[in-house]
Image: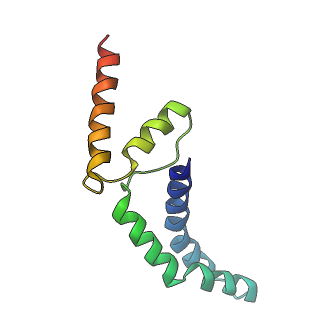
Amino acid sequence: MRLNYVIALKNTLELLNPLANTLETFTNPLLASVTETVSSPVLSDLLKVLRGLLREDARLVKGAAAMRTLRCYTIKSSVNGLLDVARKIYSEIIDDIIGV
């Protein structure tokens, strides 16, 4: 479940730069404050860290089976050796099930 939150955070952070670009055109003080907040370098740094760990195509999907598969492959390969082994075993089991 926590990985779902990380995926959602990555997706949200990816939307902040376009949001800031859109809000820059407004002169409202409240919107200027929002623009400043979403343009924070801390958020950009966090997005860089997440992009280093998660696959670029990691997105939230509908359906329990699809989400389970997505979570299995969300973290990039070579980040964790045990996770790579677990993925391989999972893929082999799924292939065996499909082959039956």
Q: Is residue 77 above or below residue 98?
A: below
Q: Is residue 44 above or below residue 100?
A: below
Q: Measuring 29% from the left and 57% from the top, which residue is drawn there?
A: 79
Tell me, what colour scheme is on the image?
rainbow
Residue 19 horizontal/vertical position (percent): 58, 72
Residue 14 horizontal/vertical position (percent): 49, 66
Residue 97, image quadrant: top left
Residue 35 horizontal/vertical position (percent): 62, 82
Q: Is residue 91 above or below residue 79?
A: above
Residue that sits furthest to the front in the current view: 82
On screen, residue 14 versus residue 52, left or right, reads right
Q: Measuring 32% from the left and 24% from the top, which residue is drawn there?
A: 93
Relative depth, front residue between 19 and 56 = 56
Residue 88 horizontal/vertical position (percent): 26, 36
Residue 78, image quadrant: bottom left
On screen, residue 31 versus residue 83, left or right, reads right
Relative depth, front residue between 27 and 33 = 33
Quadrant the C terminus occupies: top left
**Count of marks placed on residues:** 0
Q: Measuring 43% from the left and 36% from the top, which residue is drawn there?
A: 69
Relative depth, front residue between 19 and 95 = 95
Q: Is residue 73 above or below residue 65?
A: below
Relative depth, front residue between 15 and 45 = 45
